[in-house]
Structures are given as C-alpha cells and as structure tokens.
Amino acid sequence: MDRTLLFIIEFWAVIGALIGGVVTPLVVENKKFNEWLAMLLGVVIGAVGNVFLLVPFWLLLSRLPEDERTPLRWQRDAISGEEAAQQIGQSMPLESLRGLSTVLVQNFWPVRREDHEHSHRSTYILVFLTLVIITAIEVTITYLDLPFSPAGPLAALSTMKVLLVAMYFMHLRFDSKWYTAIFVFSLPFAAMVLAVLALS
Amino acid sequence: MSSETRFVTDEIQERGNGREAELVPDMALEHPEEIHLPPPSIGPIIVGLGTMLLLLGIIVPVLLPIGLIVAVLGALKMANFEEIDLHPQWLRHLNDRKLGMWIFLASEVMFFGALIGAFISFKVKDGFEEAQEILSLPLATVGTSVLIISSFAVVMGLEAIQSNDRRVFRNWLVLAVALGLTFLSIQAFEWYELMHEDITAGTLFGSAFYLTTGFHGMHVAGGVGWLILLLLRSRRYSASNYLGVELFGLYWHFVDIVWIVLFTVIYLIH
C-alpha cells in the first residue's frame, strides 16, 4: 500500500473519530449514560466505522470501466504533493502550496477545447462567485438590525440567485427560447396556487 | 491482467464505441437507415411494481423492504438503457428528451409552488416565532453553500465532458456526490434537533417544515442516486454524447433553485 493512500485513510479515520467524539455525547445527553464513556465509544466507532464506510466507495471505484483516458486504478492518476512539487522543479514547503494547486488543476480543470467560443467555463465560475457573494449578503442582512423589514431585499436577492442559476447553469440563456417558455408557463399556475392558499 | 479479461474489456470497448457512433444526431439524419431503435425495456414496469409495494408498505410494513429491493433492482436494470435521440420532423430545433425534462421541471414548479405557498400562508397566520428560534441559521447557511457548490460541480462536470475530458468529469461528479450526501446529513441533523425540541409533525410549524424540507430532501436523495448512475455509466459519455449529463444537470440545478427559495422563506425571512 503506498504512503499517500495510507495517509488519506488515516486522515479519514481521524475525521470519523472527531465526528463520533462530538456527536455521540450529544446523542446520549439525557439518557443515563456516562458522557465520557460515550465520547470514547464514539471516537472508536467513528474511526473504525468511517474506514468501513470506504468499502462501497472502493467497490464503486474498482468497478469503474477502464479506458485510455481513465486508468482503472486511481493511484496511477493521483500524485502526491511532493511529486507535484518535484514536477514543477521546486521543493517543500512553500512550494507545496503550488504543488496543491497543480494537483487541483490536473484533477479539476478540463482540457482545452478545440472550439473555444462554445466554452462557458469562465461564465460558470463568475456566476458561482456571484451566487456565493449574494448568499453572504443575504445572511449578513438577516443578522443586521435594520429599521425596516428585510423581507423585500431578501426576496429580491433570492430572485436574482434563482434567475442566475436558471439562465446560466440551466443554459436557458443559450438554448432555444421554447424551453424558457415551457418553464415560465408553469409560473402563473404556481402563483395561482399560492394566491388561493394565502386567501384561504 | 490475464489475456481473457483483456479480451472481454476490449469487446465491451468496441461495443461501446459502436453505440456511441450511432448516437451522433447529424449522422443519424444523413443516414436514416442507421437509426437504431432499442427494444422495449421491462425495467420501468419493475420499478413501478417496486414503488407500488413500497407505498403499500405504509399499511403493511413487511412490504417496505421488499418494495425497496424490487425498485432498486428495476432501477439497476433501467440503468443499462441506451440513449437514443430521435429527431422528429416537427419542432426540429428542440430536442425531445430535453423538452420532456423541461415539462417535468414545469410540473415540479407547480408542486413546490403549492408546498411553499402552504408554508407561507401558515407562517403569515401563525408567525412560527418560537419554532424559528430553534432553527440554526449558520447550519442552514452551510447547507445552502454545499448545495450551490455541488451545482457548480455538476456544471463544471458538464463542461469537462463537453471538452472530452472524462477523468475531470468523474472527479467533479464524485465531488457532487460527496456534497449531496453532506447536505442530506446536515438536513438529518436538523430534523433530529427539531425532534429533540418536541417539534413533531403534529404541530403547525412541524407539519409545514417537515413536508417542504422532506420533499426537497427526497429530491436530493434521488438526485444523488442518479449521480451515482451517471458515474457508473460515465464511459458512455463523450463530447459527442453528453445529453444525459445535461439532463441530470437541469434536474440538479432545479433542486438547487428550490432550496434557494426554501432557504429564504424558512430561514432568512422572519
């Protein structure tokens, strides 16, 4: 077993132990049970159970069909931070960050396309960042003590988020207008149901 | 790897390639005789039977596990369906499978419209003041972020498969599966906490909250199942055949949209 895999499994078990240690005392809180014993039990169950949880995932991975682009054994693709740092000709530790970014780009950035004009990846990233920022603003508004009711601005911001997801992630912006028409067609009916419920 | 296994993989590879070549729509239009119609599948009937048993399980609990097993077996059988795009003469610029998906989503809008409408009207009448104190906004914010990131993961997966990069596509999908499961566990924790505070389905807030978030959670769970199917079938998808991924994306983003609305209505507006 190679060291990277061992490290990942250890890390996974530690996370399980942490979750088990936090959750189990909460679960047995008002039962007659020593909470320290419960925590110890939770740590053990979490560590062992989390490793066992990996079994279906491993089965899934080993059953993924093989082809030239995607070798069956994921170890062939994955490289450790050190290897990545070596690949770009630098050493740890500051460069390990750069190594991490190399790993991320290698595993999560699609290859360049021949037809650049049909690629929307920068748009997707922009929309995603906008969604995150709007969500942050919404939550901040809720915590602030505003002199007026925040319901209006919140509804407006949420509508903006819905529109962004529908237009860009669901491609309504780029697709035939008929799809938009079908989707929008259902809105009056939903509004009607809403009005009936509100008036009843 | 033994020579025998190699032979079998090669055969599957060849068959898979042949199938994908038939799916290129332009080719099918130029050579109508090459349109390949798959035989009718018994899978949907098995799933229907399983679902019926599952629902009967509400009355007779013994049927619950049986129905679940039958439905899962049927779904696994259906997972082997071939993806064929027939191009009818009318509405030529529309894809019939995508059209079907949008009609389904339109019906879902009305369904969730009714649920959210009920929640709002209960909220206006009752206020839900003390119940809303128990809900944890930070936890819900984490859940919302997780769902938005998973939506982004699916859209980047689509982008990757459109670029013919199947390895990156799989990585994004695995990330989306993990995020979907995270969202579900956050929901389960929230429900557990509410049950702890004696908010049962018998109270007005409880019934409204569990109904809306429960139906949304069922949609997320179904989406995660679909995602796993996509992962298992991922070898079939390529830059010339990505509609299956796109249709899943539509569903997943719709579930995300519903959660954006629910998050605002339930957690943000007091």
Image (spheres, coloured by chain):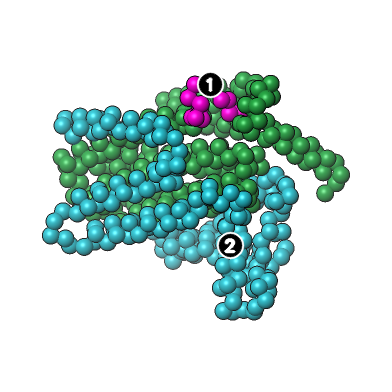
Element under label 2? helix
Q: Is residue B191 visible?
A: no
Based on the displayed image, in which of its 4 quarters is residue A178 positioned?
top left
- Taking A115 as reference, is A132 left or right? left
The answer to which of B51 and A42 lies nearer the viewer is B51
> How far from the left and from the top, in percent, is residue A29?
37, 58
Q: Chain of mark 1?
A: B
What range is drawn magenta here?
B84-96
Mark 1 residue crowding within 10 angstroms, few (<14) / some (14–19) / many (20+): few
Disc 2 packing (10 Å; few <14; some 14–19; many ≥20): few
Circle 2 residue: A105
Q: Is residue B63 above or below residue A161?
A: above
Kind of residue indicated by mark 2: Val
Residue found 62% across the figure and 31% down from its top: B26
Q: Colour of chain B?
A: green
Determine the secondary structure under disc 1: loop
Determine the residue positioned at 50% across, 50% down. A120
Q: Which residue is mark 1?
A: B89
Among the chains pictured, the one given cyan colouring is A
